[in-house]
Amino acid sequence: MALNVARLHCSKSKFTQRVVGCRSSCLRKMSPTQWELPPELCCRPMAFVALTGLDVVYNAVHRAIWDAFCANRRADRVPISFKVLPGDHEYPKCRTKRTSYEWYIPKGILKTGWMNKHLNLVPALVVLFYELDWDDAQWKEKQSECATKVEIVRTSLQGRNTKVAVVLIQKKTPLPPGEDVVASERAAALCNACDLSAKSLFVLPHTDHLVGYIIRLENAFYEHAQTYYYNEIRRVKSHKEFLNKTTHQLLFVRHQFKTGFFSELKQDTQNALKYYKTAYSLIHELRAHETNMLEIKTLAGFINYKICRLCFQHNTPLDAIAQFRKHIDLCKKKIGSAELAFEHTAWMSKQFQSFGDLFDEAIKLGLTAIQTQNPGFYYQQAACYAQERKQQATQLCSHEPSVSFPTPDPLETNSGALDFYGQRPWRQGHQSIDPPDAEKEKQGILALQLKERDVLHSELIIALLSNAVAQFKKYKCPRMKSHLMVQMGEEYYNAKDYTKALKLLDYVMCDYRTERWWTLLTSILCTALKCSYLMGHIKDYITYSMELVGRASTLREDQKSRIEKNLIRVLMNEVPEPEPECDPGSVKAAQVLWSDRVSLASNNEFTVEVQDYVPFIQCKAKFLSPSFHVDEPVQLHVYLRADCPHPVRFAKLCVSLSNQEYNQFCLVEEACKGKDVLETSSQQNMCLVPGKARKYCFKFVAKTEDVGRKIEITHVDLMLGSESGRCVYLNWRGGGGDAASTHEALQASRSFKRRTRVPEQQVDWEAISIQASTMIISRVPRISVQLHHDSPALTNEMYCMTVTIQSEEDTVARDVSLTAGLKPGQDANLTQMTYVTLNSSEVCDEAHPALLTDISIGELQPGQKIEKKLYIRCVSTGSRIFLFHVSYAMSTTVEGKDITCRCHKDETVTIDTVVPFDVAFKFVSTKFEHLERVYVDVPFLLMTDILSASPWPVHLVSSELQLASNMAAVDEPQSQVEGVVLQTGECASECFSLRCPPVQNGTSTVAAGHYLISWKRKSACAETPVVKTSMILPHVIVETIPLYVHADLPSFGRVRESLPVRYHIENRTGLVQDVDLSVEPSDAFMFSGLKQVRMRILPGAEQEIVYNFYPLMAGYQNLPVLNINLLRFPNISNQLLRRFLPTRIFIKPQGRNGDASIAAA
Amino acid sequence: MAVCVAVIAKENYPLYIRCVPTQSELKFHYTVHTSLDVVEEKISAVGKAMADQRELYLGLLYPTEDYKVYGYVTNSKVKFVIVVDSSNTSLRDNEIRSMFRKLHNSFTDVMCNPFYNPGDPIQSKAFDGTVSAMMVPSC
């Protein structure tokens, strides 16, 4: 059934369209009744122009001309209806004009033939086509022939104002006007001969530009036609002065209508509307009585139609609607003869329908309608009146079969048609209040009633409803649409088309069900039940019955009881009692159908998917827990409750689970089959007492393969009836619940009642919630996993973690395995930055994985404890999550079943990795001055500062300098930090004296090499390997200098003691150097030696200059400044060279006593 | 005076429907149900931002030949629908408004009842009384 519903849903639009489509075609096929508006009223009036003298069958030229007139008449062409008539065509005779209206008593309002006459019979203009060139050889003869033809036309139009025009079809292209003298002469002569005005003679050269000429021609015709209609309007108006208000009331209406109609023909719609409006108000001034009511209403309907049509055409839809409302209000009460009340409702229905059509047509031409004002409402109301008509018809026309149609037929007229619209055939033209012949009147009414009896009302109603459905669908009224579809379904039911009825009802049912309008649903279900009964559809019958006896039904208890009894009969394969208020004929047919069905042995098993209904048995299934351990039984409860008036017994209850192997455990079945379904007392368990919830418990042991899987209830099946008779499976998808239960559960959860206590034995139905799935999870591990480590880890260190696994099982844990390492699913880069090993002997590298899987541990006896050491090396800083997963297998017993289950325990730990120390490098001169660059062969110092950042004491095992090739140590460098332990924040420094060998160019940047520190954390045990951390030394700029100066002087001097100072000046170039040397005087020293000298130093040679300083003051004293100027390298500044020289010296004061030097002095 | 008064839940199912004469109950149910089309449309036409200042009274929902259907939506989207006879021309818009206001007040009282579970059908004597007062006396 669920599938069916889905299919219906997807074909929703198609379906309605098809129904609507087939209905409207049906409507068209029906013979036009007296209520149909005449086509000449509904069309758009166009000027009528007759064309004569054209032989469209045999003459190709004429054919082409005619085609040009009538083909492709688009909106931009003038509105004319053309007709080809023979030259001697007889036009309707014009009656002699009345000179006085004094003795004239009109017989009716409007003649039935009048509109047609002026649309199609009496032309505004007759055009005579004649082949004649100006230079025709037989001009004279032809001219007189033409004149004769014109005369013939004139004669047959005797008394009419119809104009005549002549068109000469010519082979030659005419010359410009005025140039052809012959032409203008002959034209004048022709006009004269035919008694035509010059304006009525046209020339149609049969050349290339035929359509262009034709368009010019028809525009000229149109002007003539307009003049004609203008004159007609004036003619009709002129009658007015002869009329008097007492006897000629009908004529006032007639004349107004006629002027309106002529105005329309003239395409003067504004005035037409005005005339029609006057006509409309005049018609309601007529004295209305039973004999002329029909005529008045018919004409009022016509005029109203015209007004509304023109209003829509003028794009004033509100005026149209207002006019229509006025019309309806005025005419609603004009019922006329009570015996023919159905005529009034039929007429009303037609009024609404034709207004709906007009409205719809206007929308197609661009009008916008809205939800609350659309054609649907008018169709709906039309359907309403059609329904009323049907009721009245059944009341008024249910004559005895013996009553026969009266003879002679009072509805027959001599001509076969009526003379005036809306009159009775048996008393045409009768205008007085009383019928002329009471007997004839009676016969006439009887004839009409008998005719009405044969009308297929249902078809009419359905057609109107389907029109309305289509409209409401368009204007977003889904509920209105559903409502109309219900009405359609009911009408189909009335028309005994049960298949269509059921289709429609079944289709809308779900809308009412989901919106929870139970009253409406119940009403629809009742009709649907009748349909399914009458058609002998067992499955539908069962489905609808089940819902009607259930909680969604608003039926009375006795009705429910009747339906339930019928349902039980069907389940026992018996014929149910007929539904009440069914057509007796159909019931008889249905009973035959049912007994056929009963005798049929096969096909007695049905499955009803109750998920989308509100069946009379409710079901809720729940697993007691959202998850079960594999070593405990899975428990499942199924609750059932019946809402029907009588207890109901079922034959089987089975739950289907996603793993079908468990289904066998979830089954309740009748012990002995073939027993009476009604006998409920014997097996209480299988019997559902109305209003009482019953619980069925199931229990099974999950398979170990299902660990980690979900077990779902796919459906719950409840079998009613018996396999021998007829059985029905109620099938709940998932864990039960139906179309109404979700909302009920929600309401129950909000309710204060849920907090009330329920007696032990009873089940609180509302409190039960469905749990349709459960998870099978592994057995709870009884094992402890402990981790010992000192966080945080240091970068590059072999971080040691100790895993302690202890079994708390009562039996042996087999296949114990450990998976340890970086937890998967973290940043992918971490995998490359983390190595794990069990081996402590060496530092692990890229070859080692981040996660060690399935480290086999073997068996663990109860209580046994095992320790594993794990080394982790993190190459980068940051935090990481490590996983320790211990799994094992063990055997246990559940519910007497031996199972082997695997258990596992996970431990995770987050470890931060930090840098153990920071190392800073700097290059300084031998004077510990910061160096930006170093000089070739001039010694300098490399300083390293190791600052501990580790929270743990770090043991520096040793350090090592790996110098690059262009860097050399001055002497054997030795580690000065060996064995040092750094606490947090402590710093260790080293200093190495280095020098650079000569470089190629004057200046270059060179790599200095590496600095290696071997270390481990202080707390680590002895076997933990030492980690070597290598650091790249900074690059340094090496520069060559041409001259190197250094001084030899003692470490201190003494006041007034000679202080010898030796300056060495080395020429490091391949050139002879001229050096200017001078010593600046100083207050602190006297000195002897060369004060100013210029000397020449050979390449690679060294000059020595000796001074004897004699200190005068104690304390730190600046030495006399030595200025050196290189003549060849003026850019080598004095300042630069001076950096190599000491700038000051400490001078000790003179000794006071016992000083040998003083004694000497 | 009304011929039918209905209270419709936010989810569009009926909480309360009373109508006279009771013979045409089904018809009134359909009338009220179909009027929800217009109510829904009117509510959705008001933008989200304007929802706070929305006028609760929706006015005439749609006219039928025989009845006029008026609508009213509370801020919690509970709908009130009142159906009056078309022939009853004496009722003006203001009177319909005041009927809705009375109905709303009475409904608020129902909601304030701690034993009433919102969403359940209304079974309140006081509410019944209010509705009866605005209904055409049934003969």
Image: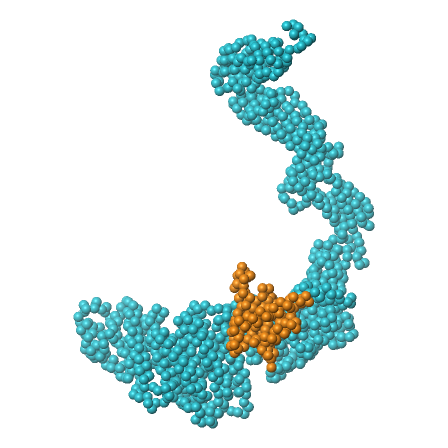
Chain colours: A cyan, B orange
* Residue A1103 in the image: above or below residue A357: above
Can you tell which quarter of the image residue A283 is in? bottom left
Can you tell which quarter of the image residue A584 is in? bottom right
Q: Which residue is at 43% across, 76% downward?
A: A323
> Which residue occupies the foreground of this view, A1051 or A1120?
A1120
- Residue A521 appearing in the image: no
* Residue A193 in the image: above or below residue A846: below
> Which residue occupies the foreground of this view, A863 or A282?
A282
Left or right for A413, reference A903:
left
Left or right for A953, reference A118:
right
Residue A861 x, y percent position in the rendering? 81, 46
* Residue A927 in the image: above or below residue A761: above
Which residue lies most toward the top here? A1160
- Residue A597 appearing in the image: yes
Residue A650 x, y percent position in the rendering? 73, 72
Can you tell which quarter of the image residue A499 is in? bottom right
Residue A208 x, y percent position in the rendering? 28, 67
Which quadrant of the figure contains the C terminus of chain A? top right
Numbered disc total:
0
Left or right for A666, reference A1130:
right
Residue A483 x, y percent position in the rendering? 56, 73
* Residue A415 in the image: above or below residue B26: below
Which quadrant of the figure contains the N terminus of chain A? bottom right
Q: Which residue is at 48% across, 87% downward?
A: A337
> Which residue occupies the foreground of this view, B80 or A1050?
B80
